[in-house]
Image (spheres, rainbow, N blue to C red):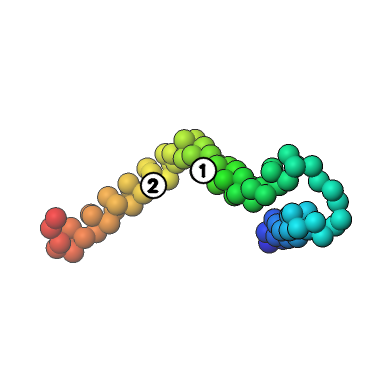
Amino acid sequence: MMKLAQWLWGLAILGSTWPALTTGALGLELSLSFQEVLWPLPAYLLVSAGCYALGTVGYCVATFHDCEDAARELQSQIQEARADLARRGLRF
């Protein structure tokens, strides 16, 4: 919950600062080049967050480790279940 609160606070700060800067509510005289970068800033941030999320998921999928001990345990449980079902008269 703490990380969610940090992200929400960050988004709230950015979400309140961006309109104040773009509408001139702070009374700052911003250069034209700064204004040209400032207007599409939310789109840039959204695309950057999407790229970060995609990269994180891709990295986790690429480095996924197999649990060989758990796989052996599951296979033995399957064999036990088949033996139990065969003892009870089920054929497969």
**Residue at 80% across / 56% down in the picture?**
24
- Above or below, 92 against 38 in this view is below
Graded by Cα atoms within 10 Å as few (under 14), some (14 to 19) or many (20 or more), the crowding at tag 1 reads: few
Position of 45 compared to 28: left or right?
A: left
Residue type beneath disc 1:
Leu
**Residue at 27% across / 50% down in the picture?**
79
**Residue at 14% across / 55% down in the picture?**
92
Helix, strand or loop for disc 2: helix
Give the percent coordinates (x, y) of residue 68.
42, 39
- Total of numbered circles in the picture? 2
Return the residue nearer the eye: 80 or 50.
50
Residue at the far bottom in the pictured view: 88
The reply to whether residue 70 is in sight is yes
Q: Which residue is mark 1?
A: 54
Position of 62 compared to 32: left or right?
A: left
Residue type beneath disc 2:
Glu
Give the percent coordinates (x, y) of residue 80.
29, 53
Quadrant holding the N terminus: bottom right
Q: Which residue is mark 2?
A: 73
CA separation in Å, label 1 and label 2: 33 Å
- Given contact means CB atoms under 8 Å apart, are the residues at marks 1 and 2 in contact? no
Residue at the far right in the pictured view: 27
Return the residue nearer the eye: 8 or 47.
47
Quadrant in the rendering for residue 4: bottom right
